[in-house]
Amino acid sequence: MPANLTPPYKAAEQRYREATDDPTRLEALNEMMQLIPKHKGTEKLQAEIKAKIAKLKKAPAAKPGGAKAKSLDNIPREGAGQIPLVGPPNCGKSQFLKAVTHAHPEVADYPFTTRVPTAGMMPWENVKFQLIDLPPIALQSFEGWMTSLLFRADAIFLFADLSSDDLLDDLERALAILKEHRISLDHPEFEVSDEDYSLDEVSKRTFLIANKADLDEDGIRLGFLQESYGTKYPIYPINSQAGEGVAALETDLFRSLKLLRVYTKTPGHPADLNDPIVLSAPATVEDAAYQIHKDFAQRLAYAKIWGKGKFDGSHVHNSFVLADGDVLEFHLK
């Protein structure tokens, strides 16, 4: 059965995954229980949510006082998606982050340089994706906070080092460690059915970055990588230092996440085409309003729409399905 989890439900689930205290988790779980589609395919997920609610209600209240240490996984979400960079030691993640964003991670030619997460914004046309460089995926460097961050990710950039003769073994070890932490990396078109969906396990759309392509003489290691993983992941040969190969990755990321951009305008004024609302397709007029604010969506009477194949300024109802590039003018009750 295909997933039918609504945008409001997914927003509540995101708040649950990002919560750092039990009261916030409980509030999000209760909202998820109200919003989840009630059909046979979600019975397992409904039971899991109910069990988590019951467990949190029985948990002792946290004692007041005392400063809380800042959690390394508590990185506020920005842009059209949050994309962690994962891979074995010394695979060039930090160099990639530096090349495609304005972030300044520590870059060195020895392993385990990255110890804490570093975020940066990668632009594509008029949207941006939040990239997060993580410590390498290795037994001696994997920490619990990394699991929490990976669970919330919209997609994963998985790195392989084309300068290393051990790239296949290194990649296999990294994937095994992630699997031990209930994180599976899958093809970006992979869809999880409601019956298989769980809050305690995740499958993430993954893009395999064959990094340091300039150091792969005659493309021999790239050939090995394509032979072993070419049917599981899309592979992008990239030279991070020169920025080569990044454009195709950015375009495919937007397409694969099934995103669309909607613009808003006020009566008598043009739309600001530099500041889109980014939604997951399929999305409706009400979904766009909800992205602005929950109360805004509840007060929405109708909208006027402009877009390709549409009669400019025509009235559309709240359940009207949007396309990339549509312009909306909201009218409230």
Image (cartoon, grey):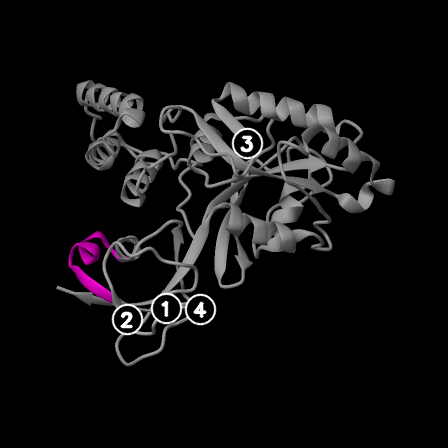
Stretch in magenta: 292-303
- Disc 3, SS: strand
From the image, state whether disc 4 or disc 2 is nearer to you: 2
* Mark toward the start of the polypeptide (4 vs 2): 4
Q: Is residue 295 magenta?
A: yes
Residue 39 visible = yes
| Residue of label 3 | 186
Q: Nearer the viewer, residue 328 or 222?
A: 328
- Disc 4, SS: loop
| Residue of label 4 | 274
194 relative to 302 in the view: left or right: right
Corner quadrant of residue 41:
top left
Amino acid carrying label 2: it is: Ser
Q: What is the C-alpha distance between the residues marked 1 and 3?
A: 37 Å
Q: Nearer the viewer, residue 157 or 39?
A: 39
Q: Position of residue 299 (x, y in %)?
A: 15, 59
Q: What is the C-alpha distance between the residues marked 3 and 4?
A: 32 Å
* Disc 3 residue crowd, few under 14, some 14–19, many 20+, Cα 10 Å: some
- 311 over 159 or under it: above or below: below
* Mark toward the start of the polypeptide (3 vs 2): 3
Amino acid carrying label 4: it is: Asn
Q: What is the C-alpha distance between the residues marked 1 and 4?
A: 21 Å
- Disc 2, SS: strand
Q: Are marks 2 and 1 in contact (CB under 8 Å)?
A: yes
| Residue of label 1 | 310
* Disc 4 residue crowd, few under 14, some 14–19, many 20+, Cα 10 Å: few
Q: What is the C-alpha distance between the residues marked 4 and 2?
A: 23 Å
| Label of residue 142 in the image | none
Q: Is residue 149 magenta?
A: no
Q: Could you tell me how many numbered marks the image carries? A: 4
**Farthest residue toward the bottom?**
268
| Label of residue 314 in the image | 2
